[in-house]
């Protein structure tokens, strides 16, 4: 299960509406990097891969590959818009540690 806050849902819907190409879903990935070892990534995806998990989160299709799914299961994604920071923030109960910005984590 992946959770999106109301602010994150609004932001994703705005990005989908603004996309110049058709969108199959919101891709959620984890890759090496960031200050804690692993970092989150998101992008609008034109096509679903054959082995993707496809989750309906409040009407938004979220696509997750099989390697990423165990690392993001039960993650909550929020969208923050303040004077000092604008962007998505991740709260992950699977993480052993994370950075202050909420963009990277360790397991």
Image: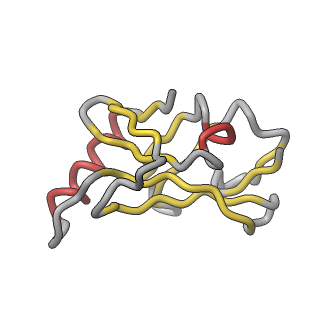
Quarter of the image with the C terminus in it: top right
Q: Nearer the viewer, residue 95 or 98?
A: 95
Q: Residue at x 39, y 43 (%)?
A: 62
Is residue 4 shown above or below 8? above
Q: How many marks?
A: 0
Is residue 70 left or right of 3 when viewed as pictured? Answer: right
Residue 99: give x, y in percent of width and height: 76, 53
Instruction: Classify 101 as above or below 69.
Output: below
Q: Residue furthest front?
A: 50
Q: How is the image coloured?
A: secondary structure
Left of 3 or right of it: where is 103? right
The residue drawn where x is 35% and y is 54% is: 48
Q: Position of residue 69 (x, y in %)?
A: 60, 41
Q: Within the image, what quadrant is residue 32 found in? A: bottom right
Quadrant of the image occupied by residue 74: top right
Image position, residue 17 (x, y; %): 15, 58
Q: Please give the name of the residue rendered at 60% of the width and 32% of the height, measured from the top-left corner.
A: 73
Q: Tell whether 107 sits left or right of 77.
A: right
Image-based side of 53 in relation to 33, left or right: left
Image coordinates of residue 92 in percent, x first then y, are 66, 37
Q: Residue at x 42, y 35 (%)?
A: 4
Is 27 in front, or is 85?
27
């Amino acid at each position: 299960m992946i959770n999106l806050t109301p602010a994150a849902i609004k932001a994703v819907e705005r990005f989908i509406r603004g996309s110049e190409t058709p969108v199959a879903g919101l891709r959620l990935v984890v890759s090496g990097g960031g200050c804690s070892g692993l970092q989150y990534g998101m992008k609008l995806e034109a096509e679903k891969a054959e082995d993707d998990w496809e989750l309906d989160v409040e009407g938004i299709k979220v696509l997750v590959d099989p390697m990423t799914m165990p690392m993001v299961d039960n993650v909550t994604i929020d969208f923050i818009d303040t004077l000092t920071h604008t962007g998505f923030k991740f709260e992950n109960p699977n993480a052993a540690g994370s950075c202050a910005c909420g963009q990277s984590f360790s397991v």
